[in-house]
Amino acid sequence: QVHLVESGGGLVQPGGSLRLSCAASGSIFSINVMGWYRQAPGKQRELVATITSGGSTNYADSVKGRFTISTANAKNTVYLQMNSLKPEDTAVYYCNVRWGASSSFWGQGTQVTVSS
């Protein structure tokens, strides 16, 4: 079994910061990519940021310069530092882990609300 435990969501004012974390455990071997995606009401799930086992990162244009993805704990934990948050960042944020040839697993999601 695979377990992804997400935390760090919440309510924050525009311009504020939040840090999301996602800890992976279970039958996961040789993680290739960890990432964060988000889904706002009425919209499709979209990529926010990914990081490979080698440390290469990829960001959506909308978050470049504001969000930073990183890993820790032998790269089984992924973080998303979100600064200068905007109301349009409001969404459910999902952690995703990919390993092996084609295995993938999603976290349960954590709500981020940016509002005054």
Image: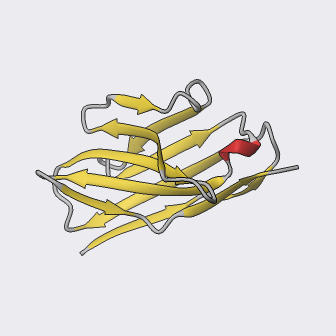
- 110 in relation to 66, above or below: below
Q: Determine the residue positioned at 57% across, 62% down.
A: 110
- 42 and 116: which is toward the camera: 42
Colouring of the image? secondary structure
Locate residue 112, reporting x and y percent: 66, 56
- Residue most extreme to the left: 101
- Give the quadrant of residue 93: bottom right
Locate residue 74, reporting x and y percent: 29, 47
Q: Determine the residue positioned at 20% across, 52% down.
A: 99
- 10 in relation to 73, above or below: below
Q: Is residue 77 left or right of residue 84?
A: left
Q: Determine the residue positioned at 25% across, 52% down.
A: 98
Locate residue 79, reporting x and y percent: 48, 46
- Residue most extreme to the bottom: 1
- Residue most extreme to the right: 116
Q: Is residue 46 left or right of residue 67?
A: left
Locate residue 54, reporting x and y percent: 25, 32
- 69 in relation to 8, above or below: above
- Residue most extreme to the top: 65
Q: Determine the residue positioned at 31% across, 31% down.
A: 55
- 79 and 107: which is toward the camera: 107
- 35 and 23: which is toward the camera: 35
Q: How many marks?
A: 0
- 53 in relation to 92, above or below: above
